[in-house]
Amino acid sequence: MHTTSAPPHADDAARSSVGGVTTTGLGKRFGELWALRDLNLAVPQGTVLGLLGHNGAGKTTAIRILTTLSQPTEGTGTVAGFDVVRDAAAVREHIGVASQQATVDGLMSAQLNLTTIGRLHGLSKSAATRRADDLLVQLDLTDFATALVRTYSGGMRRRLDLAASLMGTPEVLFLDEPTTGLDPLSRTHLWDMLSELVRGGTTVILTTQYLEEADRMADDIVVLDHGRTVAHGTPQDLKSRIGDDRLDVKVASADDVARAANVVAPFADRAPALDPERHVITVPIKPGVRVVQVVRALDDAGIDAIDVTRREVTLDDVFVTLTGAKPVDDADEAGRQGQERKS
Amino acid sequence: MSKSLLNDATVLARRNLEHIRQVPEKLTNVTVQPLMFVLLFAYVFGGAIKVKGGGYAEYLLGGILIQTLAFAMMGPAQTVATDFQQGVIDRFRSLPTRRSAYLLGHYLAEMLGAILTIVILIGTGFLVGWRSHADVLHLTEGILLLLVFASGIMWMGLWLGVLVRSPDAVMGIGFIIVFPLTFVSNAFVPIDSMPTVLQWMATVNPVSVLIAAVRELFGNPITPVTKHVWPIDHPVAAAWLYSIALVALGWWLAQRRYRARTTD
Ligand SMILES: Nc1ncnc2c1ncn2[C@@H]1O[C@H](COP(=O)(O)OP(=O)(O)OP(=O)(O)O)[C@@H](O)[C@H]1O
Ligand SMILES: [Mg+2]
């Protein structure tokens, strides 16, 4: 099924030859706070960029600027070859947006929500209806096509919002935390659908708080922290910089933390992270190391290990490894930055 | 862009009509409520208030038409405020639509409501004894004046909707503005029956001028004017000026505020 692939729009003169998305020194300030700073992107057509970051990292801010909903304070950006400020109208003709809170109309049926958007995209009535029916099938909403959207569950609303973003057959698709609120099955379904779109030439920019999601979907990942880009690369790049799995070792007393860190050091391929308050040592283990080896070594050293758990790398680990510290709590950080600026 | 502004606006207007189809109660304030007002005022006050030159029903209709249309300001204000609150506005803004299509769409839908209100009020008025004593030309001018006034009201309502932070605020603000304006006027009682201070207020009140103009154009009784100022002495000319000014002001305020609120 290739109904959702992006058609070529080669007819516009104002357009630079580069499709996809580019930004140069893009930044946005709200009062004293830089929500986004110095974002540089070069997303080739037909690829997926993952914007990865915690709450308040600046993901939505970046999406809003690129979808012409918000004006940048500094820097420039192009989407599908058009400048997001000067050619905002042209940009809107080539994009689809699914925002973080599903913006669908609760007082209309799913079908009407979609056809209204189709008509605003300039489709004829019959074309809009056909496209809507097609997307309702793809997003598994046909059984509820004529039901009022305010009776929808959260996940259904999100899926409808996604369908809405695809009504205009966009060249560049922006998805702000698209899998939030979706059950595992819908999530996998969405990933499959996106893969197919990308194969058809659609460029996708998605945001997420989950490393595994970015890892699975994105060709390129940008890690944001308080508006700044702290890492940028392919999932493989990031993997090679932050290592593979993590082993969380919890010991009984604070005195054992440093000693345990020494014991586990031979199993790690980069420096373990210590959390003396929670008595936890996070060990980036070398490939091939098995949990039982670590447990035995700790036992031999006479250390009382309460718990040893192997897990996949998370966004927190990325921050710990790249910046050497756990990200500070948002509120604290904002307060501190404010004070620094005032003094 | 091959699509016209009007295409976008009618698509958006249809959205409002669909809301009404889903929640018909939304229509009560432009249908049942005015109808009730006519019946209540005609029968409760009708006996007590004497009007020179005609029955109370003939006097009442002009007042109730203008009052109901003025209160209709809250309709667009509430829908727009709700759209902003739910973020629906961002969806429309990211689509290739003209910026002005959004407000224009609401305006078109609300005007359909206003026309319905006028029809219901005149119909009910007819039932309780209202008659027009004007020729077709003046009657038509009267209807046109009502429509222009309604346009001004709708644009003011759209402005209010973009202005407030939450739809809940609309009712309160709307009442504070519209209630005194429509009651301290010649809408239900002749001005000469009021205390002197109120007589002044009611005389300079543009609502009184509009109501007097409608009565004159419909050939209905106009009570004597006690204080003389130009507008109330020339109600039809003044009412046209006021209405056109209201349209211009409301349109300008709504566009300006909408522009400001959708720029960040
Ligand atoms: N309109 C606004 N006015 C003031 N500050 C804002 C505004 N929008 C965002 N911010 C601030 O900018 C920063 C980045 O916000 P943004 O919404 O981009 O984060 P995010 O990465 O999308 O977070 P989340 O994962 O919670 O959605 C936050 O500190 C936020 O408080
Ligand atoms: Mg966000």
Image (spheres, coloured by chain):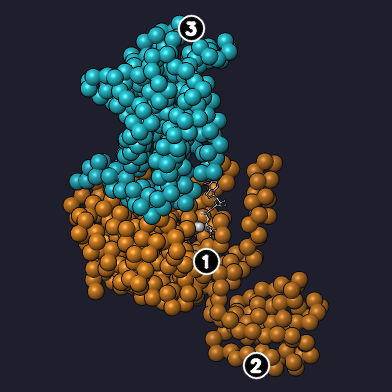
Chain colours: A orange, B cyan
A232 relative position to A339: left or right: left
- As drawn, B225 above or below A183: above
Q: Are marks 2 and 1 on the same chain?
A: yes
Identified at 44% across, 34% down, the residue is B39
Given residues B148 and A308, the one toward you in this image is: B148
Query: Alpha-carbon neighbours of circle 2 within 10 Å: few (<14), some, or many (≥20)?
Result: few
Q: Amino acid at mark 3?
A: Lys
Q: Amino acid at mark 1?
A: Gln
Would you identify the image quadrant in which residue A4 lies?
Answer: bottom left
Given residues B256 and A23, the one toward you in this image is: B256
Chain ID, mark 2: A
Q: CA distance from mark 2 to mark 3?
A: 102 Å
A158 relative position to A89: left or right: right
Report helix, strand or loop for mark 3. loop
- Percent across and percent down for residue A91 are 31, 50
The residue most toward the front is B47
Identified at 38% across, 64% down, the residue is A147
Would you identify the image quadrant in which residue B120 lies?
Answer: top left
Chain ID, mark 1: A
Tag 2 residue = A293
Q: CA distance from mark 2 to mark 1?
A: 32 Å
- As drawn, B160 above or below A307: above
| Residue B227, disc | 3
Report helix, strand or loop for mark 1. loop
Tag 1 residue = A209
Marks 2, 3: nearer the viewer: 3
